Amino acid sequence: MARYRERRIRLNSSSASFDVFPLLLLPAIYICFMVFAVIGMDPVAVAAWLGSSAFRVTMFSGAVWSMTQSDVILAAGMGLLFIETLKSIGSPMLSLVNHGIAVMTLLVYVVLFISFPAFTNSTFFLLGLMQLIDVIAGYTITIVSSRALTR
C-alpha cells in the first residue's frame, strides 16, 4: 500500500496562480470586452458579431470551410474545459480553492446571462453550461481521488 502512494502522479504546474485561476473565465472576459467596449449593449449587434465569419479556409476539394466568431469562442471554451478538468487532479488544497472560484465564475455567467440582453444568447449560455460542467466535474474528481487515496 505504501508503495502505491509513492507512485502517485500529481499534475501540478509551476504556478499556484495558474492552478487556481478559472480558465473558463477567459471567454467571458473576451465577450464582455467586445460587448462593453467595442460593440455596445445592443443584442442585435452582438448577435451579428457572433454570427459573423471569423475565418475562411479553402479545402483541397474546393469547398470553403468557415467558422463564425461564436464557433471559435465555443471551441476555445471546450479546450479550456479540458484543461480545467486536468487541473482538478492536482493538489487537493489548490483544487478546493479552484472549485470555490469556479462557483463564483458560474455565478458571473448566470448573472450576466439573466441580467443583460446582450449576453442572452446561445453562445454565452453554452459557455455557462461548460462552467457548470467544470464545477460538477471538479468536485466529483476531487472527491473520487481523495477516496482513492484513503483506501
Image: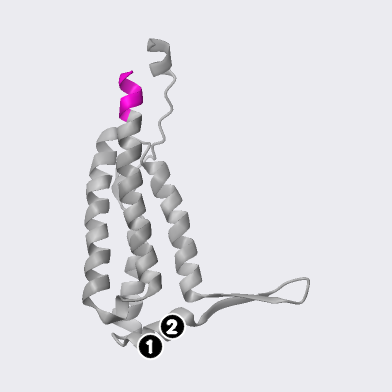
Could you tell me if the residues under marks 2 and 1 are in contact, i.e. CB atoms within 8 Å?
A: yes
On screen, 34 above or below 85? below
Quadrant of res 117: bottom left
- Point out residue 147 in the picture as x, y percentages from the top left corner: 31, 26
* Residue labelled with disc 1: 45
Numbered disc total: 2
Residue at 32% across, 55% down: 132
Rendering colour mode: one colour
Q: Amino acid at mark 2?
A: Trp
Q: Is residue 147 magenta?
A: yes
On screen, 6 above or below 133? above
- Point out residue 89 in the picture as x, y percentages from the top left corner: 38, 36
Give the magenta range: 146-151
| Crowd rating for badge 1 (residues with CA inside 10 Å; few <14, some 14–19, many 20+) | some
What label does residue 49 carry, if any? 2
Per the image, label 1 sits on a secondary structure element best described as helix
What label does residue 5 carry, if any? none
On screen, 7 above or below 36? above
- Point out residue 36 in the picture as x, y percentages from the top left corner: 28, 80
Q: In the picture provided, is 77 more to the left or to the right than 53?
A: left
Q: In the picture provided, is 9 more to the left or to the right than 109?
A: right
Residue at 37% across, 83% down: 46
- Point out residue 131 in the picture as x, y percentages from the top left corner: 33, 56
C-alpha gap between disc 2 and disc 1:
6 Å
**Front one among 127 and 22:** 127
Q: Amino acid at mark 1?
A: Ala
Per the image, label 2 sits on a secondary structure element best described as helix
- What main secondary structure does the magenta stretch of the protein show? helix
